[in-house]
Image (tube, helix red, strand yellow):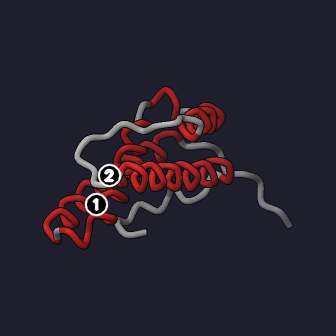
């Protein structure tokens, strides 16, 4: 028997984005301390931070359709501006990957309850 879909919880989504934002900042600091071999990790964490920062506004997280629309707009962008990254191409690839992950989570309305640092 199928379960009815759970209602959208904008507060939980904002909490998840805030936790991921903080985790990404910690991951960047850790990668920065590790040096050259961790540049990809730094760019990946910077991409996650960029995505979370772009989506933290309550106006797009209060409604599932509004968040999906915002994600679609961001995925359609040609460039993502950020400073302090090592490789622009790699950073943009990671941004698009995080945006696609969030689009899938938004469509299914699943995964936002997982707020642990490591996912």
**How packed is label 1: few (under 14 Cα within 10 Å), some, or many (20 or more)?**
many
| Label 2 element class | helix
Identify the residue at horizontal 58%, vertical 33% (top origin).
73
Left or right: 47 in relation to 30: right
Horizontal arrangement in the rendering, residue 105 relative to residue 37 (left or right): right
Q: Neighbour class for label 2 at 10 Å: few (<14), some, many (≥20)?
A: many
Image quarter where the C terminus lies is: bottom left
Q: Position of residue 28 (x, y in %)?
A: 24, 59
Q: Position of residue 48 (x, y in %)?
A: 39, 52
Query: Any mark on residue 66, and which?
Result: none
- Label 1: element kind: helix
Q: Residue at x 52, y 31 (%)?
A: 60
The reply to whether dot 2 and dot 1 touch (C-beta < 8 Å) is yes
Which label is found at residue 46?
2
Residue at x 60% of width, y 54% of height: 105
In the picture, measured across the screen, residue 49 lies left or right of residue 83, that is: right
- In this rendering, the answer to whether 3 lies above or below 13 is below
Instruction: Tell which residue pokes out farthest to the right in this image.
Output: 1
Q: Is residue 94 left or right of residue 6?
A: left
Of residues 12 and 77, the one drawn nearer to the viewer in this rendering: 77
Q: Which residue is mark 1?
A: 42
Q: Vertically, is 33 above or below 66?
A: below
Nearer the observer, 4 or 30: 30
Q: Position of residue 96 (x, y in %)?
A: 52, 50
Disc 2 and disc 1: Cα gap in Å? 6 Å
């Amino acid at each position: 028997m199928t379960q009815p879909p759970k209602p959208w919880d904008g507060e939980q989504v904002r909490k998840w984005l805030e936790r991921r934002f903080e985790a990404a900042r910690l991951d960047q600091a850790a990668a920065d301390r590790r040096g050259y071999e961790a540049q990809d990790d730094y760019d990946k964490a910077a991409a996650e931070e960029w995505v979370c920062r772009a989506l933290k506004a309550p106006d797009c997280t209060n409604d599932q359709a509004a968040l999906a629309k915002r994600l679609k707009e961001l995925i359609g962008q040609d460039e993502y501006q950020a400073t302090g990254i090592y490789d622009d191409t790699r950073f943009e690839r990671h941004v698009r990957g995080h945006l696609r992950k969030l689009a899938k989570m938004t469509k299914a309305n699943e995964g936002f309850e997982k707020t642990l640092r490591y996912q």
